[in-house]
Image (cartoon, rainbow, N blue to C red):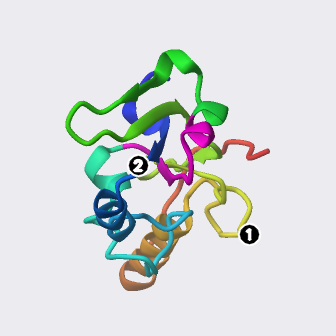
């Protein structure tokens, strides 16, 4: 993992109070507009500046998904947290990784749905077309 947006975190807590707070900050699985779970600004993905955050149901779920050398227990929170490479492809506008980039049939296949929507609206208002470097999306 080179940059923070290359990362995904897996978080487990047995504390119900902490779990309730984390659940309120949980992001949608993909970067979408409009967001469903929250306002997509005050969420764990944005606060931690990583591409994906997975709230899991057991300590084992953290260990299964993350190499043990990237797993720790928070000293204050008691949360077990693991970090691994984010799944999916990198959006060429926001740089977040998303499993839906290149799969939605959008005019700009190298963008996540949220960025694709923003670009579409800009193109409609401005009458211009955004050009991107042509990259093959596998």
Could one spot residue 5 in this view of the protein?
A: yes
Q: Give the range drawn in magenta.
A: 50-62
Residue at 33% x, 70% y is 24
Q: Position of residue 60 (x, y in %)?
A: 61, 38
Disc marking residue 105: 1
Q: Is residue 129 visible?
A: no
Quickly name the residue at label 2: 13
Few, some or many C-alpha atoms within 10 Å of disc 2 (few <14, some 14-19, many ≥20)?
A: many
**Residue 51, magenta (yes or no):** yes
89 or 1: which is nearer to us? 1
Left-right relation of 38 to 75: right
Which residue appears farthest toward the right when viewing the image?
138
Give how far across and how far down residue 73 sits, in percent.
36, 30
Left/right of residue 12 with respect to residue 74 in the rendered view: right
Q: Is mark 1 on a helix, strand or loop?
A: loop
- Residue at point 58%, 44% (across, down): 133
Between discs 1 and 2, the one toward the N terminus? 2
Callout 2: helix, strand or loop?
A: loop
In the foreground, 15 or 19: 15
Find residue 66 and report its horizontal and vertical position in percent. Answer: 59, 29
Q: In which quarter of the image is residue 89?
A: top right
**Residue shown at 42% from the left, 51% from the top:** 14
Q: Residue 84 shows which numbered tag? A: none
Q: In this view, does 134 lie above or below 106?
A: above
Residue 86 quadrant: top right
Q: Distance between the residues labelled 1 and 2?
A: 38 Å
Any magenta on residue 64?
Answer: no
Number of marks present in the image shown:
2
Q: Which residue lies furthest to the left in this view?
A: 76
At 46% from the left edge and 81% from the top edge, which residue is drawn?
36
């Amino acid at each position: 993992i080179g940059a923070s947006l290359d990362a995904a975190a897996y978080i487990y807590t047995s504390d119900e109070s902490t779990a309730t707070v984390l659940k309120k900050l949980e992001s949608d699985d993909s970067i979408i507009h409009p967001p469903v779970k929250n306002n997509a600004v005050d969420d764990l993905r944005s606060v931690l500046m990583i591409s994906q955050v997975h709230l899991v149901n057991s300590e084992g779920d953290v260990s299964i998904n993350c190499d043990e050398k990237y797993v720790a227990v928070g000293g204050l929170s008691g949360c077990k947290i693991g970090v691994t490479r984010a799944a999916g492809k990198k959006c060429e506008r926001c740089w977040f990784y998303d499993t839906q980039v290149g799969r939605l049939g959008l005019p700009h296949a190298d963008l996540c749905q949220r960025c694709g929507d923003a670009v579409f609206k800009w193109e409609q208002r401005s009458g211009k077309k955004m050009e991107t470097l042509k990259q093959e999306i596998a």
